[in-house]
Image (tube, helix red, strand yellow):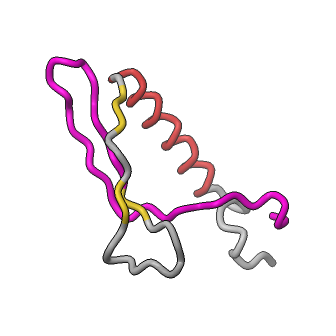
């Protein structure tokens, strides 16, 4: 990836997810490291995000699809050595 294609990436260190009874929704928030200088043991937290059950299922499906593609040979980290 060239420098012009680089996008900011913030490592996720944890998350919380729970149902929102009475709203037919799930609440989810992430813990992340916003800077390489930030200690991993003091991450920042996002606000809670609400997802409908259908949105959560779609997110799960999309994540599984991308995990499968990362596990295929010749796909994944650009730092893996190639022979």
Task: Please say whether residue 22 is one of the residues in the magenta stretch.
Answer: yes
Q: Quadrant of the N terminus?
A: bottom right
Residue at left 70%, top 75%? 79
- Residue farthest toward the left in the current orientation of the protein: 21
Q: Is residue 40 above or below residue 63?
A: below
> Where is residue 28 shown, x and y percent of the image?
32, 41
Q: Report which quarter residue 56 is drawn in.
A: top left
Is 9 located above or below residue 48 in the figure? Answer: below
Task: Find residue 53 and report its horizontal and vertical position in percent.
Answer: 33, 23
Callout count: 0
Closer to the camera in the image, 72 or 35: 35
Left or right: 58, with 6 as reference point: left
Depth check, front residue: 21 or 82: 21
Residue at 68 percent of width and 61 percent of height: 73
Residue situated in front as seen by the camera: 65 or 50? 50
24 relative position to 80: left or right: left
Q: Residue at x 72, y 69 (%)?
A: 78
What range is drawn magenta here?
Answer: 1-30
User: Residue 14: horizontal and vertical position, in percent?
Assistant: 33, 60
Is 51 situated above or below 29?
above
Decide whether residue 23 is among the magenta residues: yes
**Picture quarter with the C terminus:** bottom right
Rendered location of residue 29, percent (x, y): 33, 47
- Residue 24 lies, with reference to residue 27, above or below; the image says above
74 lies left or right of 19? right
Residue at screen point 66% across, 67% down: 77
């Amino acid at each position: 990836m060239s420098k012009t294609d680089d996008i900011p990436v913030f490592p996720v260190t944890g998350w919380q997810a729970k149902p929102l009874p009475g709203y037919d929704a799930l609440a989810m928030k992430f813990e992340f490291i916003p800077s390489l200088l930030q200690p991993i043991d003091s991450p920042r937290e996002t606000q809670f995000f609400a997802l409908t059950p259908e949105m959560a299922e779609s997110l799960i499906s999309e994540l599984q699809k991308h995990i499968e593609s990362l596990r295929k040979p010749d796909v994944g980290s650009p730092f893996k050595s190639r022979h």
